[in-house]
Image (spheres, rainbow, N blue to C red):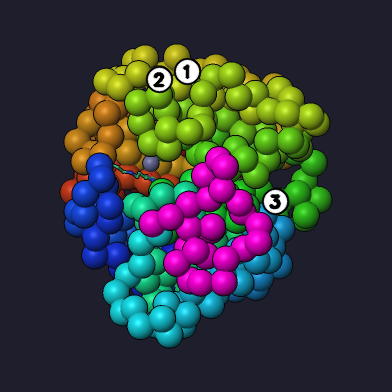
Amino acid sequence: MKTIFSKTQLGHDPKNEISDGELKPAVEIPQRAEIVLGTIRDCGLGEVMEPDDFGVDPLRRVHSADYLAFMESFWARWIAEGRSSEAFPFVWPVRTLREDPVPEHIDGLLGRYSMDSGTPVGEFTFEAAKASANTALTAARLVKQGEKAAFGLCRPPGHHSGPDFFGGYCFLNNAAIAAQWFRDQGAERVAILDVDYHHGNGTQSIFYDRSDVLFLSIHADPKVEYPFFLGHADETGENEGAGFNQNWPLPLGTHWREYARALEEACNKVVAFKPDYLIISLGLDCFENDPISGFKFKSDDFTALGNRLAAIGLPTVFLMEGGYAVDALGTNCVNVLRGFEA
Ligand code: Q9C
Ligand code: ZN
């Protein structure tokens, strides 16, 4: 299958992140994409293509105008405030605090448009995020044009980003943008299956009241893992969307054999929905040696994952999400994609 990737995506190059409440070296780094790209080239998975620029319209279908304007203008305003290094949000409008009026000061805006302090914003972050979204859209277009599958080597990832906030290393919700694009191109139904180790809170929220986009996520139980405040089993959609959202929160320590049971249910749910297209939010952080994961996948388990996804039998867009064990990231990613093609 074809891979889409742009070097512009490497411009987001965080040095540090706040992880476990402490400043630590960043894990969502350019090397992740470089390793995956290298392995794809070495194993001859298929052609690697540059994305096309789809402009702002597909982003606006998912994200609010004020959020996009904030991201666009952020770095100039940060510098104008006398700041010089990558930015971490540090104050949020939780519970009794007001979201409106929106603050004027950049520190207030940073909190208004984010969900955590673990996601630094740098000079080229938004440019990279837009390139990542274009990578997702180009992969979707290939599949719309008749390819059985395509791989968007998205980075930065997307699934934690909601309509008007960044967080969890994500700035634009690539999977949601691709799903909405399919709908706007005439598809009746789109399914998103999120196999990242973390719950895809952003994607869930974007489609929570809709029956045209099914969102399914298998992930570490948010009672004990990031993002902590969404991803429970009782979140099944609301209004029109009732019954079109499902979560499989699994305990820390989950191995492939237990995971496969949830995956079986999720795959059957996808089939019953009869979507025109399937989007896989492809996190590779269920891996046993991932530095921020509590699941226990072996590299071969990713092949089995690809096999099972292929058996669904739908035109499929794979979009990279998380996965931080850089040494094994290329192998684990290619295992899914080749497992799908086998
Ligand atoms: N104990 C994605 O995988 N917190 N985002 C890490 C480690 C943030 C993960 C804390 C995790 C975000 C796309
Ligand atoms: Zn993740």
Whole-angstrom CA distance, mark 2 to mark 3, is 28 Å
Classify mark 3: helix, strand or loop.
helix
Q: Is 111 a magenta residue?
A: yes
Whole-angstrom CA distance, mark 1 to mark 3, is 26 Å
Residue at 29% across / 74% down in the picture? 85
Name which residue type carries label 3: Gln
| Label 1 vs 2, first from the N-terminus | 2
Q: Which mark is residue 262?
A: 1
Task: Classify mark 3: residues with Cα within 10 Å, few (<14), some (14-19) or many (20+).
Answer: many
The reply to whether the residue tagged 2 has its Cβ within 8 angstroms of ligand 2 is: no
Question: Which image quarter: residue 271?
Answer: top right
Name which residue type carries label 1: Ala
Q: Which residue is mark 3?
A: 180
Give the image location of residue 269, x and y in percent.
Answer: 63, 21
| Label 1 vs 3, first from the N-terminus | 3
**Nearest the eye: 122 or 83:** 83
Q: Is 294 a magenta residue?
A: no
Q: Which residue is mark 2?
A: 250
Question: Which image quarter: residue 268?
Answer: top right
Residue at 66% across / 57% down in the picture? 100
Give the image location of residue 279, x and y in percent.
Answer: 58, 42
Residue range of the region highlighted in magenta in the rendering: 90-113
Query: Are the residues tagged 1 and 2 within 8 Å (C-beta)?
Result: yes
Residue at 27% across / 20% down in the picture? 253
Residue at 38% across / 36% down in the picture? 226
Up the image or down, 304 lies above or below 125; here it is above
Q: Quadrant of the C terminus?
A: top left
